[in-house]
Amino acid sequence: MKTTIVIPTFNEAENLPVLVEKVLSLPVPDLSILVVDDNSPDGTGEIAENLGKKFNGRVMVLHRTGKQGLGSAYIQGFQMAMKNGAEAVGQMDADFSHPFEKIVDLLQTLESCDMALGSRYVPGGKLDERWPLWRKALSGFGNFYARTILGMSLQDVTGGYRIWKASTLKAMPLERIKSNGYIFQVEMAYVASKLGFHFKEVPIYFADRRWGQSKMSFRIQIEAAIRVWQLLFMYRNLQK
């Protein structure tokens, strides 16, 4: 199965070379990476181009003119990956919070579902032990809040470590996905569930980022809390 992992970046010059080498060393045939870079001032985009040469084209780069948001980065990345023939399209962070070795398990799981998700909230899943209690509580509540309001059985609706079948993404109205913060993950899962697609969750250990600064902000958290309610209205008539 031709697989492309989409990785959005902004100032990930320290992380990207190490992550790319780790991912491409996995025993997965026909695996490639698509870096979607928002004109990082630290030169991440140029580093990605050089990695493409080093790994004989297995690293592709989509350069954008500036910070346009996580959601649009993924949507454009998904579309480019599918245009290039990907049969499975993954998404993951560049900061090592997602255990790269789990790509193997996610792809195996994808054989019997439409989207496989690296989950922090199923048995065996875990948050970084170094996180303070308030941060764990905020993460857990945000997940409970979203899946309760939207009536979803998925345990980790905010998780961003996923691999989709290309056929699933092609059947979704990607042009309607407008969320541009971390609520993007919720919107994608909600739309897919409304369309009747089947998910499976694979437990992961979610680590804090190794280098650099978190992209999470208070504005993003407020957007997420409000937009969950908007999703109910936006997709009220969507059905399989």
Image (spheres, helix red, strand yellow):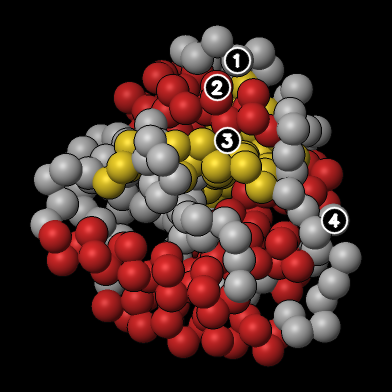
Q: Which residue is mark 4?
A: 171
Q: Residues within 10 Å of mark 1 (few under 14, many from 20)?
A: some
Q: Amino acid at mark 3?
A: Ile
Q: Position of residue 201 (x, y in %)?
A: 55, 42
Is residue 174 rendered to the left or right of residue 144?
right
Q: Amino acid at mark 4?
A: Ala
Whether pointer 2 and pointer 4 mark residues with C-beta atoms closer than 8 Å, the reply is no
Q: Earlier in the sequence, mark 4 or mark 3?
A: 3
Q: Quadrant of residue 38?
A: bottom left
User: In the rendered image of this protein, does residue 134 appear above or below residue 235?
Assistant: above
- What is the distance, in whole Å, between disc 4 and disc 3 at their CAs? 19 Å
Q: Which residue is at the front of the view, 182 or 11?
A: 182
- What is the distance, in whole Å, between disc 2 and disc 4 at their CAs? 25 Å
Residue 104 image label: 2
Q: Earlier in the sequence, mark 3 or mark 2?
A: 3
Q: Which residue is mark 1?
A: 28
Q: Quadrant of residue 175?
A: bottom right
Q: Position of residue 49 (x, y in %)?
A: 49, 32
Q: Residue at x 31, y 63 (%)?
A: 139
